[in-house]
Amino acid sequence: MVKAIIGGVVVLVIGGTTVAVSNSDIADNFSKNTGMTKQQAQQYVGNIQKSDLESFSKVGQDLVSDGNLIQTELSSIDCVNYTYKWETASLSCQDARNEFQTISNDETALGNCYQTLDTNLGNSAKLKMNECISDIDVVNADYDLPVATTFLDSNTLTKQKNTNIYNKSVLEAALQSN
């Protein structure tokens, strides 16, 4: 949970521990994680306002909710009795169902991980941060699956990936600060 942004420093609580990380460290990590230049990453990070940031619990709840929504939608896809307009030679109905299931499971796992970061983790905080970083990588890879690129436009996917990478960069900066 972000407590304050003071100058170029972000003060947050992760796993019950207060951590101060610099926007510069976050931007450096963001640059490495996205392939953006350092200048582009600094601009991206610098444009994020405190009012744009949510607690890990809120972000986690949203991801779990998205995962549950995908599950609900998934139950209405009938590969036996219907042929869908989005089906192609490279994306069968069953493949789409499997990929939706993967995205649902992975978003839910990341959401649960984020929610745990807003609890008192004591000595296991670093392990949980590393777990969330790994989960972020998995979810971002899911957003490259054919079903994601078929149903979501590239701007939405890029925005979601960058949001995830920002969170990853914050967690990495927190780990580096300890």
Image (cartoon, rainbow, N blue to C red):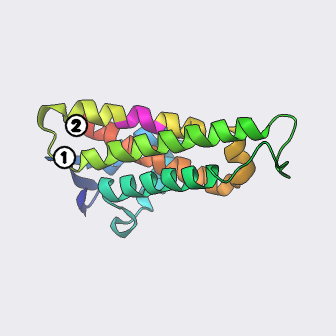
Task: Compare residues 125 and 96 and report the one nearer the observer.
Answer: 96
Task: Compare residues 40 and 118 and report the one nearer the observer.
Answer: 118
Please give the residue where the numbered disc 2 appears in the rendered image: 177
Of the residues shown, which amino acid type is indicated by label 1? Val
Left or right, 67 with respect to 97, comes to left
Left or right, 48 with respect to 40, comes to left
Of the residues shown, which amino acid type is indicated by label 2? Ser
User: Residue 75 at what x, y percent from top left?
Assistant: 62, 50
Residue positioned 53% across, 44% down in the render: 104
State which quadrant residue 3 falls in. Answer: bottom left
State which quadrant residue 35 falls in. Answer: top right
Q: For residue 134: magenta?
A: yes
User: Residue 118 at what x, y percent from top left?
Assistant: 23, 50
Q: For residue 165: magenta?
A: no
Task: Magenta stretch: give its range.
Answer: 132-136
Q: Is residue 11 above or below residue 79?
A: below
Task: Compare residues 33 and 101 and report the one nearer the observer.
Answer: 101
Q: Are marks 2 and 1 in contact (CB under 8 Å)?
A: yes
Please say whether residue 143 is visible from this viewpoint.
no
User: Residue 59 at what x, y percent from top left?
Assistant: 38, 56
User: Residue 62 at what x, y percent from top left?
Assistant: 43, 58
Please give the residue where the numbered disc 1 appears in the rendered image: 19
Image quadrant in which the C terminus is located = top left
Residue positioned 36% across, 37% down in the render: 132
